[in-house]
Image (cartoon, grey):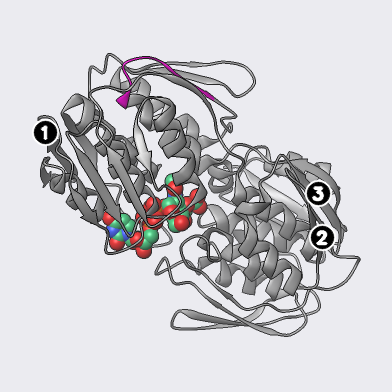
Amino acid sequence: MDRLQVSGGIRLSGEVRASGAKNAALPILAASLLADAPLTIGNVPHLRDVTTMIELLGRMGARVTVGERLQVEVDARAISEPFAPYELVRTMRASILVLGPLVARHHEARVSLPGGCAIGARPVDLHVAGLEALGAEVRIEGGYIHARAGRLTGARIVLDTVTVTGTENLMMAATLARGRTVIENAAREPEVVDLAACLNAMGAAVSGAGTDTIVIEGRERLGGCAYTVLPDRIETGTFLVAGAITGGRVRVGGARPEHVDAVLGKLREAGAAVTTGADWIELDMQGRRPLAVDVRTAPYPAFPTDMQAQFAALDAVADGVSTIVETVFENRYMHLLELQRLGADLSLDGRTAVIRGVPRLSGAPVMATDLRASASLVLAGLVAEGTTDIARIYHIDRGYERFEEKLGQLGARIRRVSGPA
Ligand code: EPZ
């Protein structure tokens, strides 16, 4: 298995460009199942999770063409097998996003339950309950969701927990239902807004995306379209933290500053000078050590859970004591145990991590446990003395495009090695 070796002590500087957002590309790829014409998607990041989704669509009978310049065309008119097998779903939970489109247009689906992952149980009960509200018959058997429906019927759905892919699944299913669907307590993430814009370009009638109430007027059919995926706000935030943790100066181009307001606020609180333009963000730490900042995650537009691990690394070397409270997932603290191996001084009290910043970390072998935890270990390695050797970095390849290459552009000394640690 591949590992990353990071040498600490380099102050990063330079510019990188944000890739397309993984968490927008995945639902938009799934939306191709709704269309009775090909969908051409631009700015698709080249990531393991995207490859898995493309493989899943292909196995179901869709014809997928990966062009150059990150363009993917999906023709899902002829689905022969509305089936998402466990062997694929367990490697990528977002496979659940094919459920709504399959039921809405192909009237049946057999999708493996995703199962849990390192950060939590990750149930899909709200996805299932919403589809039943739209008229689907759903049975859970043998680890699979078996769903059947005639034409779905619009309904008012109240989500008792804000769920991003739950909102996306139900929004997609409702586009072909008979009549109006209202989704209350909907997720407001930019990726939900991007999906809604793509669905409307396909002929759907979705309004309110980005607010907590989304209204969908069902249509008989959806056509194809050409759509370009928005930039990845979590990748953007990760590179800005790389600049902050090393005291450097980093500019992220092709970004959407308005999608990272909460993160920019915390970076400024940590002492960074942050300037923004229409499609760029520049952070200058002016060689200073970051100040400790408290973080409490919550659904968008609050501080994103997907940036929590990165800020744990920043706080580990910050001046002062900070607290981090993860409110979205029940077990998203695995990275803390690995940061301790690098010398971080922290403790976990229930859902609150207390981090006492130390002036320096020291490199050691560590292990990635989930996507964003891997990124936080790389960030810590950038400032740890000596070399930090990170195992199981396939987690990184799921969600960051050319991660070590982009960090290398900023001056980081990082290389990928193969073989056992
Ligand atoms: C999406 O996951 C993202 N993935 C996650 O990003 C992100 O961390 C998460 O939203 C929160 O922002 C994609 O978009 C592909 P949720 P999702 O449903 O939709 C509970 C990354 O790093 N819940 O919003 O699976 C759930 O247990 C990944 O890129 C239910 O109880 O997350 C959690 O506590 C990691 N029942 C909370 O809702 C349900 O049916 C939020 O989960 C669904 C969710």
Disc 2 marks which amino acid?
A: Gly
Q: Which residue is mark 2?
A: 8
Quadrant of the rendering where the N terminus is positioned: top right
Q: Which stretch appears magenta?
A: 34-41
Q: Which mark is residue 149?
A: 1
The single residue placed furthest to the right in the displayed view is 286
Q: Quadrant of residue 26?
A: top left
> Residue 250 versus residue 135: which sits nearer the camera?
135
Q: Which residue is mark 3?
A: 251
The answer to whether residue 228 is above or below residue 251 is above
Q: Is residue 39 magenta?
A: yes
Specify which label sits upstream in the sequence, 1 or 2: 2
> Which quarter of the rendered image does ligand 1 occupy?
bottom left
Q: Position of residue 31 (x, y in %)?
A: 37, 30
Number of residues whose C-alpha sits closer than 10 Å to that of mark 3, classed few (under 14), some (14–19) or many (20 or more): many
Disc 1 marks which amino acid?
A: Ala
